[in-house]
Image (cartoon, rainbow, N blue to C red):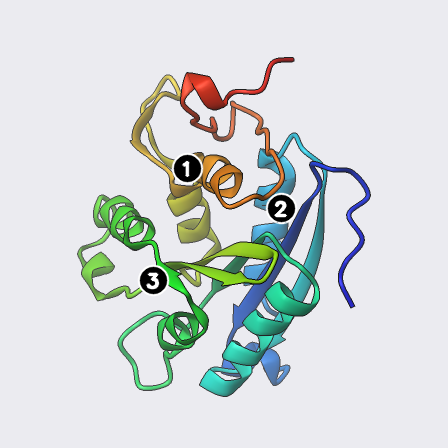
Amino acid sequence: MKAERRHPDELILGLVSVSDRASAGVYQDQGIPALEAWMAAALASPFQVHTRLIADERAQIEAALIELVDELGCDLVLTTGGTGPSRRDVTPEATLAVATREMPGFGEQMRRISAAFVPTAILSRQVGVLREITGHAALIVNLPGQPKAIAETLEGLKDAEGKAVIPGIFAAVPYCLDLIGGPYLETHEAVIKAFRPKSAIRAR
């Protein structure tokens, strides 16, 4: 059943945390709470959240992504976890399997940001993709598993005055959603400034 959009510009957001141990109750998931908190601080537009906590199983990840996009009608799906080189890390493979088009700039920028902090950024395999079905399209982006790294990749690197040195990936998300027919998102610029060409900025 599709989620009901209560406002034309309300974002329908899917959050997926991929973790064998958290999904089994061995420890409390930190990915979804971190994502929800960041989105609440960053978005000036209304949004509703639909969450899934699943194991590192490709079939489960694919099923969750398809459900969130095709059945619930999510405009944006963010995943966290399962993007490293270990054999159980299969989130990128599952994401690419449900994609209709790849958006390689998202993974490239995330690794660029992370490389400013740790040399192991080159081991991350995050991807960004579009899933397009009849009458609907969604952006799906894999994020790192740690809350600190999630915030860093979404916000980017800032100098002492708060000016972006390396743009975070979320700066491009609102315009991407515009281009695929999604809701018009506005952000709190103290957290992240959405970038749009002047011609795409809506008059207030």
Mark 3 vs 2: CB contact within 8 A: no
| Residue 67 percent location from the top left of the image | 63, 72
Nearest the viewer among 35 and 28 is: 35
Q: In the rendered image, which residue does mark 3 sit on? A: 126
Q: In the rendered image, which residue does mark 1 sit on? A: 172
Task: Determine the CA span between mark 1 and mark 2.
Answer: 19 Å
Q: In this view, does 49 lie to the left or right of 122?
A: right
Q: In the rendered image, which residue does mark 2 sit on? A: 37
Instruction: Look at 52% across and 42% down and name the residue there.
Output: 177
Instruction: Look at 44% across and 26% down and name the residue there.
Output: 196
| Residue 79 percent location from the top left of the image | 50, 63
Classify 55 as above or below 76.
below
Q: Which comes before the other along the chain, label 1 or label 2?
A: 2
Instruction: Look at 65% across and 30% down and name the residue there.
Output: 44
Quadrant position of residue 63: bottom right
Q: How crowded is mark 3: few (under 14 residues within 10 Å), some or many (20 or more)?
A: many
Task: Determine the CA span between mark 3 and mark 2.
Answer: 21 Å
Q: Residues within 10 Å of mark 1 (few under 14, many from 20)?
A: some
Direction front: furthest residue: 134
Classify 76 as above or below 84.
above
Q: How many labels does the image show?
A: 3
